[in-house]
Amino acid sequence: MPAAFSYAIAGAHHNWGYESEPEPHLDGRRILLPRGKVLGGSSSINAMAFVRGQKQDFDDWAAIGLPEWSYAHCLPYFKRLEQFSGSAGSYRGTEGPVRVTQPSGRNVLDGVFLEACAEAGFSLNRDVNGADQEGVGPMDQTLHKGVRASAATAYLDPARSRPNLQILTGQRVLRVALRRERAVGVEVSSGTADHMIEAGREVILSAGAANSPQLLMLSGIGDAASLNRHGIHTVADLPGVGCGVQDHADVSIKQACTQAVTTTPALRFPRNALLLARWLLFRTGDGATNHFETAGYIRSSSKQDRADVQICFMPLLVAYDGSAMIEPHGYMATVLGLRPKSRGALKLRSADPTDPPVIIPGYLSDPDDLRTLRDGLQQLRRIFAQPAFDSYRGKEVAPGAALTTDQDLDGFIRRTAKSTHHLSCSCRMGSDDDAVVDGEGRVRGIEGLRVIDASVFPAITSGNTNAPTLMVAEKLSDVILGKAPLAPEHGPHAP
């Protein structure tokens, strides 16, 4: 059920339950870092936001020595992967395996938010995944007819009957099996016995930005000094493994509503039971959406040359775990810095594959990231203060009207900012000596081994990371199969 994503994230059944080390710039808090423990990985527990990012993101990848990753080279793969419910055009795909729905904004407050954004001077944009991301409009969702669309439903389910496919669940990959400097398979454990799965051609790691670098290091691929401390023999000395980790941090404004028009009561008994029943019977109603139906990509200040924050509106008040808050009615919006400068690291905790990795995201270690979130909060406050909200605006629940100075807001951010679950860049793709993989996902210094997931991003993209991760996989699948790449597309209205 799309509306239940917060329970999937919080629960232990589908989530590895990782958390960061104490983050010094977030008041020493450990930040929850959900990772999908299920077929489809994190695409099966995420918030279902489909955001490609900005053209410049990929042109920046090209500029560091990866010319085949420019936006023009990536656009045809974005189009190939999606089956978009909205208007077809030069920037959207209609025949791909991933169902992407453009929501209508079912709550009256979604329209009020768009009106307030226009009153605040922000442009409206009907398709933020089209020619230009900047503006405010519908937030595309990876769901179809009230059901989540994940990598598993899009790619794995249709292939289940193929004779050359075997799906093994309940298996923990321990390490990549290496013979000299070539990957020859993977060692796995079922919990009762270990065994080897041999590779005919190559091994592809798609274990995500936390576990792909962990598996490389457990296999002897990483910084030699660090591996030696854990008693792991170094096969390939690649200091870049686990370095340069990035994630988006977000923070929320929560507002009471003076009219009974929000979805907040649907989270409480008995209405939550009715919500579930309607979804089970008909796949409709408030259970059939993630409630992030309206979003914007705006500039936090006039000094920015392009959108640098994302704002996501929800016509309800909800806590992190998905439970309703004390206010009977309310609405909220999150602000996220699109291109954080802060980078962190991922390390081995031990040579035991069952030990979770040490994850140090480094949130707000660059002061510009704190400034971006603070300016974004001020912009959200300005939007909520517009005349469109006059008939709905109650008290500000968080941060609270008493917090007005930069120092106040900085403290609020440090106390409440959380991960947006976009961990990436831990096995960076590039052409320099610090890169872990090349432009085709091949691990440097090792034959027959690729990494294909968000860990290979050279830099985090401007928005939620599921869509660009799928694009990377689509693009590299052609490389693996020896197919000619799709022809670059610039789009008729490319800026």
Image (cartoon, rainbow, N blue to C red):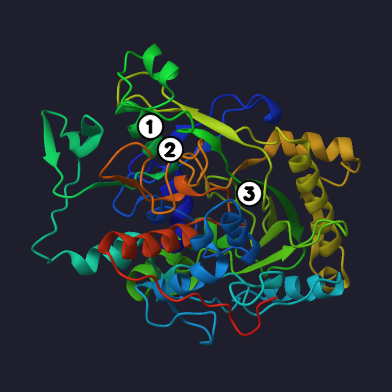
Seen from the viewer's position, the closer of residues 190 and 348 is 348
Is the Cβ of the residue at disc 3 closer than 8 Å to that at disc 2? Answer: no
Q: Check disc 2 and report the residue beneath it.
A: 210
Q: Check disc 3 and report the residue beneath it.
A: 325
Choose top left, top right, bottom left or bottom right for residue 399.
top right
Choose top left, top right, bottom left or bottom right for residue 381.
bottom right
- Taking the image as shown, residue 150 lies to the left or right of residue 72, namely left
Is the Cβ of the residue at disc 1 closer than 8 Å to that at disc 2? Answer: yes
Please, what secondary structure does the residue beneath circle 1 have? Answer: helix
The residue drawn where x is 33% and y is 22% is 234
Seen from the viewer's position, the closer of residues 412 and 71 is 71
Q: Amino acid at mark 1?
A: Gln
User: Badge 2 local density, few (<14 within 10 Å), some, or many (20+)?
Assistant: many
Percent from the top left, x then y, of residue 241?
45, 33
Residue 174 in sight from this viewpoint:
no
Please, what secondary structure does the residue beneath circle 3 have? Answer: loop
